[in-house]
Amino acid sequence: MYHPSVYDNLKVVLEGAVYDLDFSGEIEIINRKDIMDQAIIERNYHIDFVVSSIGEAMRGAISLTSNLEDLAMEKLNDNPDGAGSKLSVVIETPVYEIETDCKQLQSILKKWGSGDLKGDIQQKLTYIYGQPRHVFTNTISIQLQKPVSEEEPERISSVLEELIGSMKEMNEYFKGYKK
């Protein structure tokens, strides 16, 4: 009999958690990708969304990833402790004053620096050449350090809750800006 992988089971949990938030009206899903990269044997499930109370100005995303090494550890060792999938989140938001705004956003993200949410945080700024440079796009990526296992599916809901909370806090910070 076929036994689903940890990734397969966690993907169902992630999809259910995100769609529950969509059905409740808290978020609106704007894109979904379910990718199998056969060149490097990696699976990735990615969902983009906006928080309904914020709108299109800020976007969030959550991704679940598993590669050949993860699958081999799980299947060859008959589901050992530590088998899991990687979880990452992305927030895309405009910034107006690079040093001030990025420093404030980093402060908002401090909760992602410890416990089950501990992740590597990176802020990447971009702008479109030829356009006025009074607004930059800040793509904030957080790769959680600890993989998610089947024994802790509630971690996915906690990550989603913190992601949406971080986005709402960032939105509050930017409310005073003249755009």
Image (cartoon, rainbow, N blue to C red):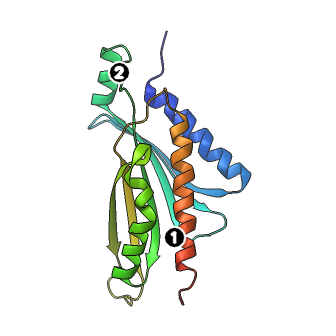
Instruction: Bin the neighbour count of mark 1 within 10 Å (Cα to Cα): few under 14, some 14-19, many 20 and up.
Output: some
Residue beneath the point at 48% across and 21% down:
4
Q: Nearer the viewer, residue 23 or 162?
A: 162
**Would residue 46 appear left or right of 56 to someone viewing this image?**
left
Residue 122's spot in the image, x, y percent? 32, 61
Tell me the kind of residue under disc 1: Met
Q: Is residue 111 above or below residue 17?
A: below
Instruction: Bin the neighbour count of mark 2 within 10 Å (Cα to Cα): few under 14, some 14-19, many 20 and up.
Output: some
**Disc assigned to residue 74:** 2
Q: Is residue 80 above or below residue 97?
A: above
Residue 11's spot in the image, x, y percent? 51, 35
Residue 115's spot in the image, x, y percent? 41, 45
Q: Nearer the viewer, residue 89 or 99?
A: 99
Residue beneath the point at 32% across and 29% down:
70
Tell me the kind of residue under disc 2: Glu
Residue beneath the point at 49% across and 26% down:
151
Residue 49's spot in the image, x, y percent? 56, 58
Q: In 3D space, how far apart are the residues under numbered discs 2 and 1 (Cα atoms)?
A: 38 Å
**Would residue 74 appear left or right of 30 to someone viewing this image?**
left
Visible in this render: residue 48? no
Instruction: Give whichever of discs 2 and 1 has the lower sequence position.
Output: 2
Q: How many marks?
A: 2
Secondary structure category for the residue under label 1: helix
Q: Nearer the viewer, residue 148 or 93?
A: 148
Q: Is residue 130 above or below residue 113?
A: below
Which image quadrant is residue 102 in? Answer: bottom left
Q: Is residue 179 above or below residue 5?
A: below
Visible in this render: residue 71? yes
Q: Are marks 2 and 1 in contact (CB under 8 Å)?
A: no
Secondary structure category for the residue under label 2: helix
**Disc assigned to residue 170:** 1
Which image quadrant is residue 41 in? Answer: top left
